Image (spheres, grey):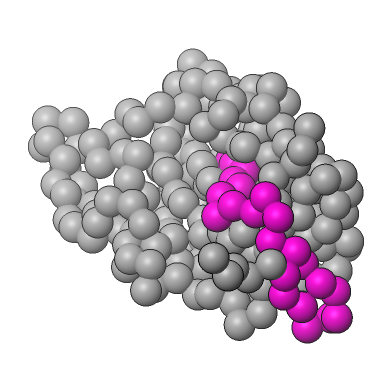
């Protein structure tokens, strides 16, 4: 049976389809309301190391396989190659315990509707942040965060009224774009990460404006102890490491 065995990238390099799989790689980071960090990076760690969080957070979580499947933090393994066709961020809203308001290990779904993201906060993230894919310290992708659609997940475009006994607010929940593959922005040219090549995805807040996560009531101080956990997927083809 005839099969494609290799193809040539625009830079002239040749990629051979030997032991390649359609297997996304992913990495997680966390933003605590009020953060002013100008940047925070993903794909810089592997399982067992702390999950990156903004500077206003205290204790970090120890990462597990739900947070990342990266083999080598900050670089491709020596026998690995990656072709990135799309970047897909997945959002979760959580809240820290009142007794430990900066301890990321206490994050849980404490308010009705969580961990679904609310439209007011998702819009704030899209307004303030941009995303870059850096390969060998060069920016190959650079756009506002809202440019990157998730393309999967629950369809949560809905309004929810909390129990009047505890919370009279009405909140709207949303997905980052239509949860369908057709909504994903696929790059016209895939971005190549070679063996041992350094790479990372960086969320950048150019102005350093505080990211205050508000509900629809626009509470000036924001939702108490609110954390946004963002799991970022690099979607495409991956040559599996041989070791």
Whole-percent x and y of residue 78? 87, 44
Q: Which residues are magenta?
A: 6-30
Q: Residue furthest top?
A: 99
User: What residue is shown at x 42% (from left), y 56% (from top)?
Assistant: 121
> Does residue 99 show up?
yes
User: What residue is shown at x 59% (from left), y 46% (from top)?
Assistant: 26
Residues 169 and 50: in front is: 50
- Check the picture and name the quadrant holding the C terminus: top right
User: What residue is shown at x 53% (from left), y 75% (from top)?
Assistant: 186
- Check the picture and name the quadrant holding the N terminus: bottom right
Quarter location, residue 59: top right
Residues 114 and 231: in front is: 231
Judge left or right: residue 239 versus residue 115.
right
Judge left or right: residue 80 versus residue 126.
right
Q: Is residue 20 magenta?
A: yes
Residues 40 and 95: in front is: 40
Residue 27, compared with residue 99, is above or below; it is below
Q: Is residue 240 magenta?
A: no
Whole-percent x and y of residue 93? 41, 42
Q: Residue furthest left?
A: 164
Whole-percent x and y of residue 138? 85, 69
């Amino acid at each position: 049976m005839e099969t494609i065995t290799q193809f040539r990238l625009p830079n002239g390099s040749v990629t051979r389809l030997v032991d390649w799989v359609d297997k996304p790689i992913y990495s997680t980071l966390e933003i605590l309301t009020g953060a002013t960090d100008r940047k925070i990076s993903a794909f810089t760690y592997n399982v067992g190391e702390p999950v990156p969080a903004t500077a206003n957070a205290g204790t970090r979580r120890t990462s597990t396989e739900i947070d990342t499947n990266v083999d080598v933090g900050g670089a491709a393994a020596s026998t690995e190659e990656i072709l990135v066709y799309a970047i897909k961020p997945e959002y979760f809203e959580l809240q820290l315990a009142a007794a430990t308001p900066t301890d990321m290990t206490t994050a849980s779904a404490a308010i009705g509707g969580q961990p679904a993201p609310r439209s007011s906060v998702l819009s704030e993230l899209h307004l303030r942040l941009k995303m870059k894919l850096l390969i060998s310290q060069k920016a190959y992708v650079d756009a506002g965060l809202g440019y990157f659609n998730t393309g999967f997940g629950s369809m949560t475009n809905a309004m929810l009224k909390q129990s009047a006994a505890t919370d009279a607010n009405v909140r709207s929940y949303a997905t980052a774009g239509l949860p369908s593959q057709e909504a994903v922005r696929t790059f016209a040219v895939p971005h190549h990460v070679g063996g041992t090549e350094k790479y990372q995805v960086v969320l950048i807040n150019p102005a350093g404006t505080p990211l205050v996560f508000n509900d629809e009531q626009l509470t000036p101080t924001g939702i108490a102890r609110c954390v946004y956990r963002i799991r970022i997927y690099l979607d495409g083809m991956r040559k599996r490491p041989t070791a």
